[in-house]
């Protein structure tokens, strides 16, 4: 459906529960928060489902937005979730029941009864912004959630998915307050000591190919244990690896369980990241995508990642 049709669909209904994806980032959380507040502004009941994977970076921004334990939704809405496989295990009960999905991933599997998709949007937050505009609702809190969504998915407007439209929307959000200063500080300018030490571990683990243009690094459960770090502390490593001078294709592997590894691939558009990750059962965007490899050790995860990169490189 179009954004206008989506806005009409939301206006005609009530009793919403909004779902986010596993290992939630600012885009999915900001979209959920903004949509919840926008629907509330229309006098509707809407809550965000509590995602157990939320990190400290975003926890405070979701205060007061979670559904009470006894809430029974009439309509399930997913934001920034391309496939039901990206729901955390806590949301398993909602599989097959999603009424509406709002998304910007070209790899969306159209699992919901209705889908509002704009694969050209830099962030799902841009779509939610336009829907809020169509609904005629906006305030400082909604604007803050939208800024979190948009800025985090385009790397504070540094990633190549950023467009003129992205900047136009951000400029409009700025008119609602100076919240963006603290968001930028929290999300882009602050690192814990554990995160810095994990960056060092990742660098030590990196193997470079193609005269330094391709890099594959890994963070194991042992690394996390050694540094007394959590999975949340390693969430932003994929973006960091792509900052190394000369690297065009950065693959970051993070161990989730004994023989489960999560690949985060950043290519800056030099290589189609979605095609690479699709070969490993994942998906995403042309410049940023991911996949989860099961029943593999670190060496096998590295081999599979490099083989997938080589296969897409061979396509030209």
Image (cartoon, rainbow, N blue to C red):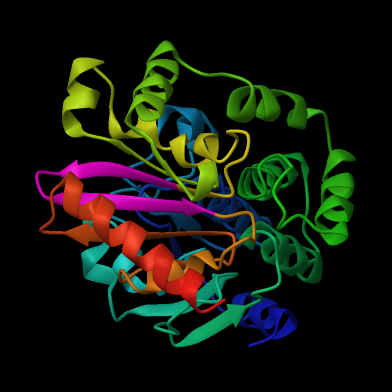
* Left or right side of 269 for 106: left
Q: Nearer the viewer, residue 212 or 294?
A: 212
At 61% from the left edge and 82% from the top edge, which residue is drawn?
9
Q: Nearer the viewer, residue 38 or 163?
A: 163
Q: Would you place residue 106 above or below residue 79 in this image?
A: below
Q: Residue 32: within the magenta?
A: no
Q: Quadrant of residue 235?
A: top left
Q: Nearer the viewer, residue 225 or 18?
A: 225
At 51% from the left edge and 86% from the top edge, which residue is drawn?
114
* Left or right side of 11 for 101: left
Q: Nearer the viewer, residue 168 or 298?
A: 298
The residue at the far top in this view is: 193
* Left or right side of 288 for 221: left
Q: Quadrant of the N terminus?
A: bottom right
Q: Which residues are magenta?
A: 251-266
Q: Residue 263: within the magenta?
A: yes
Q: Quadrant of residue 197?
A: top left
The residue at the far front in this view is: 211
Q: Quadrant of the C terminus?
A: bottom right
Q: Is residue 73 visible?
A: no
Q: Would you place residue 20 above or below residue 215 in this image?
A: below
Q: Quadrant of residue 253?
A: top left
The image shows residue 273 at horizontal and vertical percentages of 51, 64
At 29% from the left edge and 42% from the top edge, which residue is drawn?
254
* Left or right side of 98 for 2: right
At 45% from the left edge and 32% from the top edge, which residue is drawn?
59
The image shows residue 174 at horizontal and vertical percentages of 86, 39
The image shows residue 277 at horizontal and vertical percentages of 40, 66
Main SS of the magenta part reads strand
The image shows residue 90 at horizontal and vertical percentages of 23, 55
């Amino acid at each position: 459906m179009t954004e206008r049709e989506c806005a009409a669909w939301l206006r005609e209904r009530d009793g919403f529960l909004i779902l986010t994806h596993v290992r939630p980032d600012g885009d999915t959380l900001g979209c959920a928060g903004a949509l919840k507040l926008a629907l509330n502004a229309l006098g509707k009941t809407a809550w965000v489902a509590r995602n157990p994977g939320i990190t400290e970076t975003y926890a405070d921004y979701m205060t007061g937005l979670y559904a009470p334990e006894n809430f029974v939704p009439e309509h399930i809405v997913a934001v920034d979730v391309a496939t039901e496989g990206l729901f955390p295990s806590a949301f398993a009960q909602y599989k097959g029941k999603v009424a509406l999905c709002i998304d910007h991933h070209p790899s969306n599997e159209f699992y919901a009864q209705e889908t509002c998709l704009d694969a050209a949007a830099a962030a799902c937050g841009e779509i939610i912004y336009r829907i809020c505009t169509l609904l005629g609702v906006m305030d400082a809190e909604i604007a803050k959630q939208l800024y979190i969504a948009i800025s985090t998915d385009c790397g504070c407007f540094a990633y190549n998915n950023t467009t003129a439209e992205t900047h136009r929307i951000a400029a409009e959000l700025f008119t609602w307050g100076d919240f963006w200063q603290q968001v930028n500080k929290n999300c882009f300018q602050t690192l814990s000591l554990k995160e810095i030490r994990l960056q060092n571990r990742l660098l030590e683990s990196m193997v470079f190919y193609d005269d330094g243009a391709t890099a594959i690094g890994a963070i194991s459960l042992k690394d996390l244990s050694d540094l007394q770090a959590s999975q949340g502390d390693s969430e932003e490593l994929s973006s960091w690896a792509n900052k190394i001078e000369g690297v065009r294709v950065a693959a970051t592997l993070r161990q989730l369980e004994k023989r489960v590894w999560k690949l985060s691939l950043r290519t800056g558009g030099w290589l189609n990241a979605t095609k690479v990750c699709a070969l490993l059962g994942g998906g995403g965007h042309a410049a940023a995508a991911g996949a989860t490899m099961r029943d593999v050790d670190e060496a096998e995860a590295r081999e599979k990642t490099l083989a997938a990169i080589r296969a897409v490189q061979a396509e030209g």
